[in-house]
Amino acid sequence: MSSRPSQLAISTSSVQRLLKEALTYRAELASQESRLRKLEQDTSDEDGNREWSVKQEKQAIAETQAVFAPLREKVLTAAENLEELLQAEQFAKAEVDAAKELIERAKAG
């Protein structure tokens, strides 16, 4: 029988997951912006849908950018919850150190 993860481990994993999600969205945004630059620089319109492709890429960029503010709020809330948990209970030093590092990363943005 496996032991259940501690509340600290669960909260720490939550912050980690949200930070990873933010990194993934940043990478996606960079990729979309790169594709848009390429589309805008390419003056050929062989298939006749260059304008539509540029519009679609701009829309995708806007949708990705819209994710950042709510995601940032989730990261900060999860980090605050983790911080409160650290203050309320006693945990192993390794768990506490890992949690504190994630809190700092979350607050740094």
Image (spheres, rainbow, N blue to C red):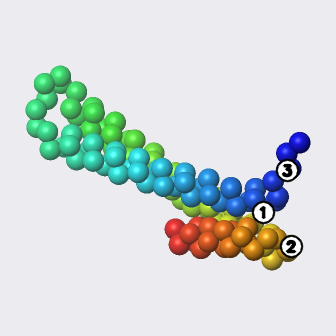
- The location of residue 1, given as percent across then percent down, is 89, 42
Q: Secondary structure at mark 1?
A: helix
Residue in the picture at 40% in, 41% down: 60
- The numbered mark at residue 4 is 3
Callouts 3 and 2 close, C-beta under 8 Å: no
Q: Counting residues from the N terminus, which is met first, the one under dot 3 or under dot 2?
A: 3
Q: Would residue 70 be seen by someone viewing this image from the given angle?
A: no
Q: Amino acid at mark 2?
A: Glu
- The location of residue 41, given as percent across then percent down, is 15, 44
- The numbered mark at residue 89 is 2
Q: Amino acid at mark 3?
A: Arg
- The numbered mark at residue 63 is none
Residue in the picture at 53% in, 72% down: 108
- Give the side of residue 38 with respect to residue 55, left or right: left
Residue in the picture at 21% in, 32% down: 50
- The location of residue 28, given as percent across then percent down, is 41, 47
- The location of residue 79, given as percent across then percent down, is 67, 67
